[in-house]
Amino acid sequence: MSMDLAKKLYAKMPEVFAKARKKFGRGLTLADKILVSHADNFDAQTWERGKAMLALRPDRVAMQDATAQMAMLQFMQANKKKAAVPSTIHCDHLIRAEMGSAKDLLRAMDENKEVYNFLASAAKKYGIGFWKPGAGIIHQVVLENYAFPGCLIIGTDSHTPNGGGLGGLAIGVGGADAGEVMAGLPWEVLHPKLIGVRLTGKLNGWASPKDVILYLCGLLTVKGGTNKIVEYFGPGAETISATGKGTICNMGAELGATTSVFPFDQKMVAYMNITDRADLANLAQSHKDLLVADSEVYQSPEKYYDQIVEVDLSKLEPHVVGPHTPDLARPVSKLAAEAKEKGYPIELKAALIGSCTNSSYEDISRSAHIARQGLKAGLKAKASFLVSPGSERIYHTMKRDGFLDTFEQLGGTVLSNSCGPCIGQWKRADGVKGKADSIVSSFNRNFPGRNDGISETLSFLASPEVVTAYAITGDLGFDPVNQTLKGADGKEFKFQPPQGEELPAKGFAKGEEGFVAPAENGEGLTVDIPSTSERLQLLQPFPRWDGKDFEKLPLLIKTKGKTTTDHISPAGPWLKFRGHLDKISDNMFLGANSAFTSEPGKGTNVLTGESNLTIAQIARDYKAKGIGSVVVGDENYGEGSSREHAAMSPRFLNVRVVITKSFARIHETNLKKQGILALTFADPKDYDKIEQQDRISVTGLNNLVPGKPVQVTIHKADGKSLTIQTNHSITEQQIAWFKAGSALNALN
Ligand code: MIC
Ligand code: SF4
């Protein structure tokens, strides 16, 4: 599969690279190489970082079950016989973690039957590979089976960049983008700027790949990577395992980066070999010059990257980030004092390892080494200790090599190969609403309410080995890396730095593979959507724009501070309605902080004066009255996930315009795709001028053109009004989406 794609790609690369070197008048970075070799039409394309829209032809599409539902429902509206590019669906997000792997999986099969049947039948019909529940988390399965050096993959999940660990550009997108690519259209993205990260030295002691990205999150912040690709290079890069590189690229999503990538090297060869892809490894080996940047780039990187960061791996300390945001970073050695000073609850209630980003053999073997030291000292985990393996391969290898046993002896529970507690699918037995407590995990995200639905929980992120040590001590006020602790016999001991293996000496064990191939010819097959379903609803096209300006629309909500997609469209219990737009829309903004109310998710209906309503209740009332509304947001609005429900629900409930200080990339595109006007304040201070009772007009829409500001008039309750400027990044084609009511309408 990947072999054929790689052969074709490598064969055409030299010619395109020669053209690109000529056109750009310089050598090529690795990101340049992958982008130009996937151009829909290299000659016709304009190339300008930060400005040009690129039309690209991805090699494949990957979708996970929570986002695949909308992606497939949208794809079906295009009336195609078959997906135009190799595509797969992975069932991982909908499995709830409660009783351990086997029972959780059985229950998931039962309670998600309708959704799994829908996805399996649609996959079969449209030529799409289907990975059954329990087979593994999308990014791990893609790394093990599909990613290859030089590839371009899009995935309906923000952590798709994991594939950068094998030297490809793997990019998170909304379902509409995936649907269009499967329908045969090129995929569009703003030509990203490049951050070059030069790695020197070698990780040692406790420091792990996770710490590279935790450190960078602190340095660059959650919006530091917006519309940028992070390209790693330097002698340090070759010292990091392929799965470790995957971890770094995966969590690059937390920088807001379009994606991250490492140059091809021998660690990648070793990983492809052990995952039964020796042919691919050999092929890449014989084309290795194509799969790294040109040598002049490495000689004078400052000439080729828009920004350079240097990290000396030898000096990197293990880090912890949080609470509530992944860019609040510090070395583990500083956390105990900070926790005491800031009054973070120091009792750690839960410690969770694994997930799509941190369940490699290396992660698990190093964590087991820490666990064994605890056991030797007669200790058990004080915090509740949960392990989420990334795939069947990982799970069976952990079992064969005794790691599962070690974790269980420590008091841990091994969950199914799925997202579980990382996406709020976790029945926490000990958490209490209204009471703050602390948890720590090796996952990617720590927004309020993310894991357990309790917004007071303080969630910290660290490497799996550090999390395992915290599981044993159960104490945030204690530095498990540098301090000594008492064993069961009262003797003091100190954890020795973790030791593990990058790859299993005996190879990977195999479990049930869990892959279902599509039908050769799916034309006669039907897609399974029961008409009475509570979980699935066919989509109705959104209405076309009526050609009129938006006059005096009420303000639905002005969000204050961080507004991630988890705030706009929370997951957890709502995940089950991801295929039912009407039902899921009741969750709209439930986690968001309003500038006018203290309780998250609540607001006032400015037409009736009724307060303490959910935002969806208010929007439904406006919609019933035929009135559209406006949402105002803060910085990096829509940070986080790719879930397009955060754009579709507002659109469905008649939000016409979203004005913010700035947007996160995937969400901004999702809004545009669904026909919502995404504007940014020309002067961010104008955000402060918006009040609850204001009515907002957006005018001149018939003259909407790329690059030209849009006028917004704010009508105050006292009859006065003021006009402000807003900017946008809407292209010619995206104006057509707005006019048609959505990108999908524009297609038909
Ligand atoms: C996440 O990590 O936030 C998720 C859940 O994987 C999302 C996708 C979703 O909401 O379904 C993502 O990262 O895109
Ligand atoms: Fe799943 Fe969490 Fe990874 Fe998202 S970040 S894909 S929810 S494990």
Image (spheres, helix red, strand yellow):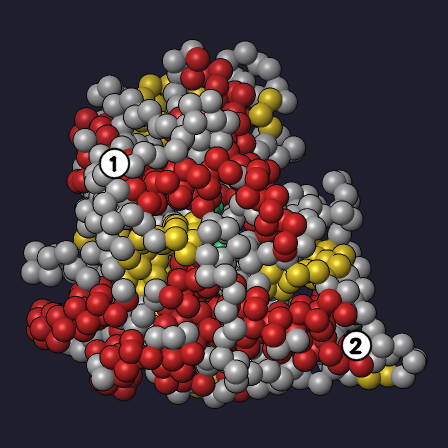
Q: Name the residue under label 1.
A: 524
The circle on residue 375 is: 2
Q: Which of 509 and 33 is in front in this view?
A: 509
Q: Is mark 1 on a helix, strand or loop?
A: loop
Rendered-image quadrant of the C terminus: top left
Q: Is mark 2 within 8 Å of ligand 2?
A: no
Q: From this viewpoint, is residue 293 visible?
A: no
Rendered position, 610 above or below 453? above
Q: Which of marks 2 and 1 is in front?
A: 1
Rendered position, 516 above or below 594? below
Q: Does the residue labelled 1 lie within 8 Å of ligand 1?
A: no
Residue type, label 2 = Leu
Q: Is residue 404 rendered to the left or right of residue 173?
A: right
Asked where in the image residue 672 lies, by quadrant, the reply is: top left
Residue type, label 1 = Gly
Q: Is mark 2 on a helix, strand or loop?
A: helix
Q: Is residue 375 rendered to the left or right of residue 55?
A: right
Sequence order check, earlier mark of 2 and 1: 2
Residue at point 71% right, 85% down? 496
Image spot of residue 462 (x, y percent)? 61, 67
Residue at point 40% right, 42% down? 119
Residue at point 30% right, 42% down? 125
Image spot of residue 659 (x, y percent)? 39, 36
